[in-house]
Image (spheres, rainbow, N blue to C red):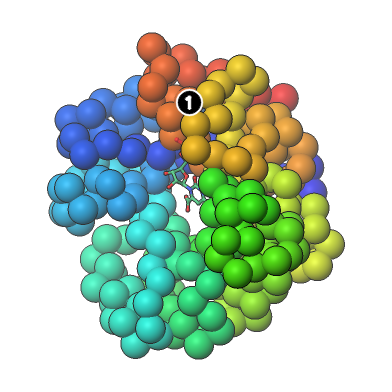
Amino acid sequence: MTARRTRLIVALDTKDTAQARAWRAQTAASTDAVKLGLEFTYARGLDAVRDVAGDRPLFLDLKLHDIPNTVASAIGSLAAMRPAMLTIHAAGGHAMIAAARAAVDDAFPVDARPILLAVTVLTSMDAEALRETGVSDTPRGQVVRLGALAMAAGADGLVCSSHEIAPLRDRLGDRPVLVVPGIRPAGAAAGDQKRIMTPAEARRAGADWIVVGRPITTAADPAAAAAAIAAELAG
Ligand SMILES: O=C(O)c1cc(=O)[nH]c(=O)n1[C@@H]1O[C@H](COP(=O)(O)O)[C@@H](O)[C@H]1O
């Protein structure tokens, strides 16, 4: 597992197109992909997302979670975006995930299919937050349950925290692409994230990709912050 290279995605979370472009340029040398999500997309629209991503691999993080027909139709609307990765919520259930799978296979040419990622339990949730939603299992138990469900329904990979990589690999083997947010370099503020690890810990745990936003984008020097994380991943 640790033989895989752990790749770095920078989350360009802003409403400002010029800011997103600047972060993209500052981090291009040390990151493998850019993530644009709800904040930027709702503020600026999909054309601006495509424009900011440019020639970088695009993780389009819209976390679709609706009835199967709506999710499938929404994925059809994203075909022109040519994303490298797309997110849906595993909690939408088997039928929704299977509909998303079918829509990806339908809407994208075979050589341009995005990696369909199912978000398991948000990294901002701890056991207590999960209990408030009616789930009495631990985050780890719930991530493995949702991860198995999502992979059986046709997802290519999962979004989870570093804490769940080992139990997911035990249950599901090497097949799921594991994308891991909730990454904090030593000393960085956790903010709203609860299930966190450092970049080096995530690499050792076997993350395929890590997602890092504020530790890069709020740094005095985003280029240096991204380069330091890339160096940590290189070991
Ligand atoms: O799907 C995601 O990317 C995601 C899932 C999750 O469980 N936790 C999570 O933080 N994310 C995203 O990862 C990024 C983390 O940002 P920072 O906390 O600023 O590093 C944000 O863009 C979140 O939307």
Q: Position of residue 22 (x, y in %)?
A: 26, 26
Q: Where does label 1 land, which residue?
A: 215
Drawn side of residue 20 relative to residue 71, left or right: left
Q: Position of residue 59 (x, y in %)?
A: 41, 52
Q: Quadrant of the C terminus?
A: top right
Query: Splitting the image into 4 quarters, where does residue 2 fall?
Result: top right
Determine if the C-beta at disc 1 is less than 8 A from ligand 1.
yes
| Residue 74 in sight here | yes
Q: Residue at x 56, y 21 (%)?
A: 188
* Callout 1: SS: helix
**Vertical relation: 220 (above or below) 37:** above
Tell me the kind of residue under disc 1: Pro
Query: Splitting the image into 4 quarters, where does residue 156 fall?
Result: bottom right
Q: Residue at x 49, y 76 (%)?
A: 92
Q: Residue at x 73, y 52 (%)?
A: 165
**Vertical relation: 156 (above or below) 182:** below
Q: Nearer the viewer, residue 139 or 214?
A: 139
Q: Position of residue 149 (x, y in %)?
A: 65, 77
